[in-house]
Image (spheres, rainbow, N blue to C red):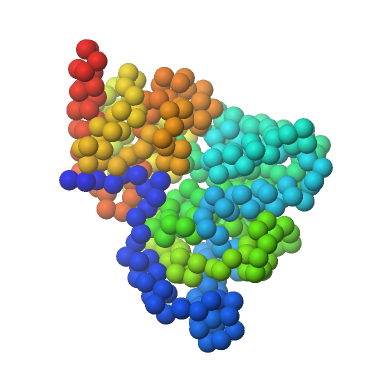
């Protein structure tokens, strides 16, 4: 029996989404930029989806820029902001950001551009005061980047507090909310960030579509000049079926419904394997996420054992899989490399039950015992 327990990596498309994508593919045959009837029909689907997303997030429709996903949204915000400052400056972010934020920032580092990374506490949460002090100490600060929910630990970050402080200093801020959508309430009006990055496939929408919410009055340099779509902020013919699917996915899944399964799993894990440890257990977390360590075993190896047993789980971020480097998130939290390499992430979602949690515990015990026997213990 196959069990999917990796919803933080991606959520399988919902039936409503598949229907919406299929319907848009068949009916919206025109280019949304064309003026004829076929183009207008496609444009109507895009505009309706924009309105629906804006209503869901409590922002203006004109603030919604459709993109290919969270990575592009993050990159647009970063490069469009830095392009406005050819003389360089300082960027402040956290040490636990997704690679979609960290990689472009690291590539920017030069004598002109300085990057500061604020580390979290041992629970995986950024200290608000430490972040504010770093912001106040930087004279040439051009951008602040912080995620709302960490994709590995599930720890909820003080993004709203940081955004409020940035607003008083008139400093642009990017909030990566890719892992927050569907897990905690997002109110763009309350966040009042310059940029909010989102992705459809995390909530059962299509892969390859996302959005960047841009605060009114914020100018974006066009990074890939073209036809001027999305009000000149992101050129390229819009992905009409994908956008329709994104809108259809909004509000269907509430990942808080899976907290009882997550809590049941963690309770049984700690009872069955006392040396295991739940990462960020004492921090506010997204309700479906459990990141834990299993001392004495290699996470990638046990992940393969679980895969053979029919379980889909992750060892750290799926977007960084294939690398033998320990999780940068766990390193930033002060977890040593050996223990970090034993980490496994489980994220529950639609279709999961406590039976899946129980089956995973049994599979973990069997895999762990098998590996210990092979090692001669």
Q: Quadrant of residue 94?
A: top right
Residue extending farthest to the left is 1
Q: What is the tally of numbered marks visible in this picture?
A: 0
Q: Where does residue 265 sit, x and y in percent of width and height?
A: 28, 37
Vertical relation: 262 (above or below) 58: above
> Could you tell whether 158 is left or right of 301 in the image?
right
Which residue is drawn at the image coordinates 38% and 29% (left, top)?
Answer: 343
Residue nearer the viewer, 181 or 262: 181
Q: Pick the quarter of the image with the N terminus.
A: top left
Residue nearer the viewer, 150 or 157: 150
Any part of residue 357 in sight: no
Vertical relation: 326 (above or below) 348: above
Residue extending farthest to the bottom is 37
> Could you tell whether 149 is left or right of 236 in the image?
left
Q: Where does residue 14 sit, x and y in percent of width and height?
A: 34, 61
Which residue is drawn at the image coordinates 59% and 29% (left, top)?
Answer: 119
Vertical relation: 16 (above or below) 180: below
Q: Where does residue 315 sit, x and y in percent of width and height?
A: 38, 34
> Could you tell whether 325 is left or right of 127 in the image?
left
Q: Pick the quarter of the image with the C terminus.
A: top left
> Could you tell whether 169 is left or right of 77 in the image?
right
Residue extending farthest to the front is 226
Residue nearer the viewer, 346 or 315: 315
Q: Quadrant of residue 189?
A: bottom right
Which residue is drawn at the image coordinates 40% and 25% (left, top)?
Answer: 341
Any part of residue 246 in sight: yes
Which residue is drawn at the image coordinates 73% and 34% (left, top)?
Answer: 110
Q: Where does residue 35 sit, x and y in percent of width and height?
A: 59, 84
């Amino acid at each position: 029996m196959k069990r999917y327990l990796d919803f933080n990596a991606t959520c399988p498309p919902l039936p409503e989404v598949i229907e919406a994508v299929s319907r848009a593919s068949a009916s919206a045959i025109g280019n949304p930029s064309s003026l004829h009837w076929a183009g207008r029909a496609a444009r109507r689907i895009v505009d309706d989806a924009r309105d629906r997303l804006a209503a869901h997030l409590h922002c203006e429709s004109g603030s919604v820029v459709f993109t290919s996903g969270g990575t592009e949204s993050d990159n647009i915000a970063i490069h469009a902001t830095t392009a406005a400052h050819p003389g360089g400056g300082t960027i402040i972010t956290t040490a636990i950001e997704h690679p979609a934020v960290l990689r472009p920032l690291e590539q920017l580092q030069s004598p002109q551009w300085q990057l500061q990374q604020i580390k979290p506490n041992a629970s995986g949460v950024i200290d608000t005061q430490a972040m504010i002090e770093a912001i106040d100490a930087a004279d040439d600060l051009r951008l602040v980047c912080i995620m709302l929910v960490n994709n590995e630990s599930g720890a909820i970050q003080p993004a709203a507090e940081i955004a409020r402080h940035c607003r008083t200093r008139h400093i642009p801020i990017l909030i990566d909310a890719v892992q927050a959508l569907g897990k905690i309430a997002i109110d763009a009006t309350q966040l009042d960030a310059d940029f909010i990055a989102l992705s459809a496939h995390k909530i059962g929408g299509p892969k390859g579509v996302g959005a960047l919410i841009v605060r009114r009055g914020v100018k974006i340099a066009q990074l890939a000049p073209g036809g001027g779509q999305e009000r000149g902020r992101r050129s390229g013919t819009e992905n009409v079926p994908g956008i329709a699917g994104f809108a259809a996915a909004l509000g269907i899944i509430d990942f808080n419904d899976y907290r009882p399964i997550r809590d049941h799993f963690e309770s049984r894990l700690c009872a069955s394997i006392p040396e295991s440890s739940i990462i960020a257990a004492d921090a506010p977390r997204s309700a479906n996420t459990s990141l834990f360590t299993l001392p004495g075993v290699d996470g990638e190896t046990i992940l393969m054992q679980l895969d053979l047993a029919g379980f889909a789980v992750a060892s750290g971020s799926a977007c960084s899989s294939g690398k033998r480097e320990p999780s940068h998130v766990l390193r930033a939290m002060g977890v040593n490399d050996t223990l970090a390499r034993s980490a496994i992430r489980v994220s529950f979602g639609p279709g999961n039950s406590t039976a899946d949690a129980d089956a995973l515990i049994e599979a973990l015990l069997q895999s762990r015992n098998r590996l210990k026997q092979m090692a001669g213990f």
